[in-house]
């Protein structure tokens, strides 16, 4: 504790942001002057949990934030005279027990469940995002792409390249190990990849990534969004997640088997089968918005069909090709999550779904290496390939009927989350859109 206080002094930090994530996946923060850091590290910081949507009722609102000292980072974009650092916190009840509505605690519980079986869970999320030009304050907010580049396009004079470079530098200073950055398929769309980690660290990194991207974009006078499908007719933004299970004792990747054609072990196949079996319910968590299902449509490299493959990017789960000498990199890439999700809840339910496949000894179906989008209905029926839910409403219904995922979310989060998502769907469903006016107003 004393070392961290001294570190903050050496870093000339003036304020500390005590951060946590609410159930909807939004970063929240309580800011204290650095003079209060020592006390908070020892005792935590009290706050009113009833003020956070989905947390506590008004009559039981007292909660406190307990900082995870390993997450201390200086925010490099803050002004020197008001330099701030962040600490990610766990949410505690007054008796010191973990709060069941804390998404971070939900992920810890899922990881502990897997560790009892001898597994550690690693994740490498890839979050895509758009950069849009800002409109005047008196004009409607419009998604105008910041550039006209395409997939892997590069120009030293392109301001988007400069923005990405500054984001990478900021991420590195925030402790993320950046592996690559590039322009994505759609105009104004980008991707910056960072190194995989254990699931909790990966979720912390995903949240750090999102607000760092937004902060640096704002310094350039543009805005960044992780909305899954901001523009009709072009690719949306996904959050593909590379996953592997590690033997908790030996540190070896239990997904690898040299004798298998795909270099996958029986454990890996069962893990894949478990995620496919729970895919419909998972959709409500990993693709959690009305807009998510505008992305999950044929023709834009986003998966729609519940199957797995190696060379087919229309599949729900893709197995990256094996490289000799890189056995530890054997992994399964889940392709239907998007960056609007709460990564703690997403990784927790993804893990429990995969582990359920292992516990039940489920067998994965045959891989589908053809483009599923070109299959006829008869082809899909013959091969037993089903579709993801087509709307948020359908996904919430599937989640309600999946006891394992409800248990993974826990007795506090599951009912509140379902009610909130059902209300979101109903609010959208009854709204009259511009498309309806254009199509029907004069013709009917």
Image: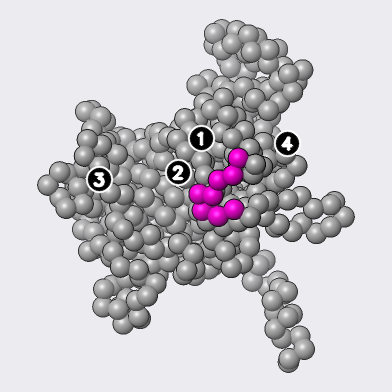
Res. 65 in view:
no
Residue 125 - label: 2
Q: Relative to 65, is 111 on the left or the right? A: left
Give the alpha-carbon distance from disc 3 to disc 2, as whole Å. 19 Å
Residue 439 drawn above or below residue 105 = below
Magenta highlight on residue 351: no
Q: Secondary structure at mark 2?
A: strand
Label 2, label 1: how many angstroms apart (C-alpha)? 9 Å
Q: Could you tell me how far apart the alpha carbons at marks 3 and 4 are, in whole angstroms? A: 41 Å
Q: Is residue 389 above or below residue 22?
A: below
The earlier-in-sequence mark between 3 and 1 is 1
Q: CA distance from mark 2 to mark 4?
A: 25 Å
Quadrant (top left, top right, bottom left, bottom right) of the N terminus: top right
Between 47 and 369, which is closer to the camera in this rendering?
369
The residue identified by callout 4 is: 219
**Magenta residues (range):** 149-156
- The residue tagged 3 is 322
User: How far, Cα to Cα, is label 3 from label 1?
Assistant: 26 Å
Image quadrant assignment for residue 325: top left
Q: Secondary structure at mark 4?
A: helix
Residue at image coords 25%, 45%: 322
Of pointers 2 and 4, the one earlier in the residue sequence: 2
The label shown at residue 92 is none
**Could you say which disc has been placed on residue 205 in the image?**
1
Image position of 206 with respect to 37: above or below: below
Q: Earlier in the sequence, mark 3 or mark 2?
A: 2
Residue 117: x %, y % from top left: 25, 38
């Amino acid at each position: 504790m004393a070392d961290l206080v001294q570190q903050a002094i050496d870093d000339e930090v003036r304020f500390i942001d005590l951060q946590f994530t609410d159930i909807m996946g939004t970063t929240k923060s309580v800011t204290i002057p650095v003079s209060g850091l020592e006390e908070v590290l020892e005792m935590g910081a009290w706050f009113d949990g009833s003020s956070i949507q989905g947390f506590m009722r008004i009559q039981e609102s007292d909660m406190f934030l307990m900082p995870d000292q390993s997450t201390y980072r200086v925010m490099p974009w803050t002004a020197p005279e008001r330099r701030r650092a962040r600490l990610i916190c766990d949410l505690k009840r007054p008796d010191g027990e973990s709060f069941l509505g804390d998404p971070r605690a939900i992920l810890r519980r899922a990881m502990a469940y897997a560790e009892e079986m001898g597994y550690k869970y690693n994740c490498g999320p890839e979050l895509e995002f758009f950069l849009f030009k800002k409109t005047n304050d008196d004009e409607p907010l419009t998604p105008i792409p910041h550039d006209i580049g395409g997939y892997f396009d590069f120009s030293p004079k392109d301001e988007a390249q400069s923005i990405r470079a500054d984001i990478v530098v900021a991420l590195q200073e925030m402790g993320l190990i950046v592996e690559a950055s590039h322009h994505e398929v759609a105009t104004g769309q980008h991707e910056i990849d960072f190194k995989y980690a254990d699931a909790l660290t990966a979720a912390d990194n995903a949240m750090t990534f999102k607000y760092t991207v937004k902060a640096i974009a704002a310094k350039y006078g543009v805005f960044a969004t992780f909305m899954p499908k901001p523009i009709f007719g072009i690719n949306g933004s996904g959050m593909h997640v590379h996953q592997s299970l590690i033997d908790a004792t030996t540190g070896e990747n239990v997904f690898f088997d040299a004798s298998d054609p795909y270099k996958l072990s029986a454990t890996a196949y069962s893990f894949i089968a478990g995620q496919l079996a729970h895919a419909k319910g998972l959709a409500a968590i990993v693709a959690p918005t009305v807009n998510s299902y505008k992305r999950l449509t044929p023709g834009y490299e986003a998966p729609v069909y519940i199957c797995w493959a190696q060379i087919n990017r229309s599949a729900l789960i893709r197995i990256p090709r094996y490289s000799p000498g890189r056995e530890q990199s054997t992994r399964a890439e889940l392709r239907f999550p998007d960056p609007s999700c709460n990564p703690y809840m997403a990784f927790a339910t993804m893990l429990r779904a995969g582990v359920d496949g292992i516990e039940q000894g489920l067998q994965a179906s045959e891989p589908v290496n053809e483009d599923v989008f070109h299959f006829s209905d008869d082809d899909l029926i013959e091969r037993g390939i089903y579709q993801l839910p087509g709307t948020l409403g359908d996904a919430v219904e599937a989640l309600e009927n999946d006891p394992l995922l409800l248990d993974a979310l826990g007795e506090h989060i599951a009912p509140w989350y379902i009610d909130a998502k059902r209300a979101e769907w109903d609010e959208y469903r009854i709204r009259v859109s511009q498309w309806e006016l254009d199509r029907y107003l004069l013709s009917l």
